[in-house]
Amino acid sequence: MPASRNNSGAGRTVILILSGAALGTLIGFGLEKYGIFTPFLRPAVIDFPSHTYLDFFFLSLSFGFRLNINFATILGALSGYYLSRKW
């Protein structure tokens, strides 16, 4: 590695935040299935439908995504961020 390169760890931070959010979501869905903290674990859905098209005469692309966020997802992402700052 070159001596003048600054290793900020931004990639590691993003990976830990996304991993924490994924684990939080899994735990949240598991707890919701058993009825523990059910009002807090209902997902808030952010939906961008796939009816958005970019159409050329030789290529047609459609864009869309659906994001389910619950309280456990937010706690998982925050814990991943905390781990990235401590590590």
Image: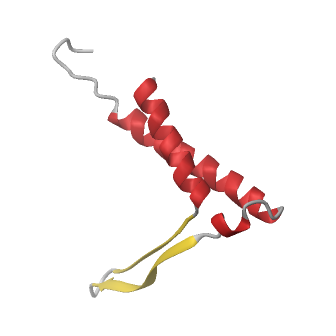
Work out which residue is located at the far left of the displayed protein and give it.
Answer: 4
Q: Residue at x 58, y 59 (%)?
A: 71
Q: Quadrant of the C terminus?
A: top left
Judge whether 79 appears above or below 63 on screen: above
Q: Residue at x 55, y 44 (%)?
A: 20
Work out which residue is located at the far top of the displayed protein and give it.
Answer: 3
Q: For this rendering, which residue is in front, 23 or 71?
A: 71
User: Does residue 79 appear left or right of residue 36 in this picture?
Assistant: left
Quadrant of residue 61 within the rendered picture: bottom left
Q: Position of residue 15 (x, y in %)?
A: 46, 40
Q: Residue at x 58, y 63 (%)?
A: 70
Q: Is residue 40 visible?
A: yes
Q: Position of residue 41 (x, y in %)?
A: 66, 64
Judge whether 78 appears above or below 37 on screen: above
User: Does residue 41 appear left or right of residue 6 in this picture?
Assistant: right
Q: Position of residue 21 (x, y in %)?
A: 55, 50
Q: How many marks?
A: 0
Q: For this rendering, which residue is in front, 40 or 17?
A: 40
Colour logic:
secondary structure
Q: Residue at x 44, y 31 (%)?
A: 84
Quadrant of residue 51 within the rendered picture: bottom left
User: Does residue 61 appear left or right of residue 68 in this picture?
Assistant: left
Q: Is residue 16 visible?
A: no
Q: For this rendering, which residue is in front, 12 or 27?
A: 27
Judge whether 63 appears above or below 82 on screen: below
Q: Position of residue 74 (x, y in %)?
A: 52, 54
